[in-house]
Amino acid sequence: TQGESSDRRLTPRQSEVLLLLERGEHIPDVADILSIEILTVRSHLRDIHRRLNVSKWPDAVRKARRLNLLPPSHETRNAPHRRRRTNT
């Protein structure tokens, strides 16, 4: 039903988190790239898991892709990304 599909929609930030994880970034890197706290990334993941009724982020990516909630992979493959700064 329409209510169910709207409940499954991801916020733009949730989509960003999933796309970065799909691209191979680790949670601390996702936090750094998005300029948010690691706990905020984890909170987004909990919300995503709940919305999509999954328990792991790879399952969330697969389900979000199946439901067309994320842009096609080729649109994000060349997106710029920052790496964590290391103290030297």
Image (cartoon, grey):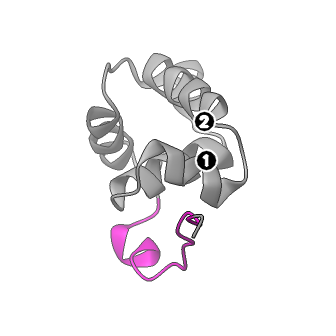
Specify the amino acid type for callout 2.
Ile
Is residue 5 left or right of 61 when viewed as pictured?
right
> On the image, numbered disc 1 is attached to which residue?
31
Mark 2 lies on residue: 38
Which of the pair 40/73 is nearer the observer?
40
Residue stretch rendered in magenta on the structure = 71-86
Q: Where is residue 18 drawn, in percent x and y? A: 46, 47
Asked if the stretch drawn in magenta spans residue 47, the answer is no
Q: In this view, does 32 lie above or below 41?
A: below
Q: Earlier in the sequence, mark 1 or mark 2?
A: 1
> Magenta span: helix, strand or loop, mainly?
loop
Residue occupying the far right of the picture? 35
Disc 1 from disc 2: Cα separation: 5 Å
The reply to whether the C-beta atoms of the residues labelled 1 and 2 are less than 8 Å apart is yes
Q: What element carries label 1?
A: helix
For the point 37% across and 42% down, which residue is it?
67
Q: Which residue is situated farthest in the front direction here?
A: 88
Residue visible at 30% across and 27% down in the picture: 56
Q: Residues within 10 Å of mark 1 (few under 14, many from 20)?
A: many
Describe residue 70's horizontal placement relative to residue 37 as left or right: left
Q: Position of residue 3 (x, y in %)?
A: 59, 20
Q: Quadrant of residue 25?
A: bottom left
Q: Residue at x 35, y 68 (%)?
A: 73
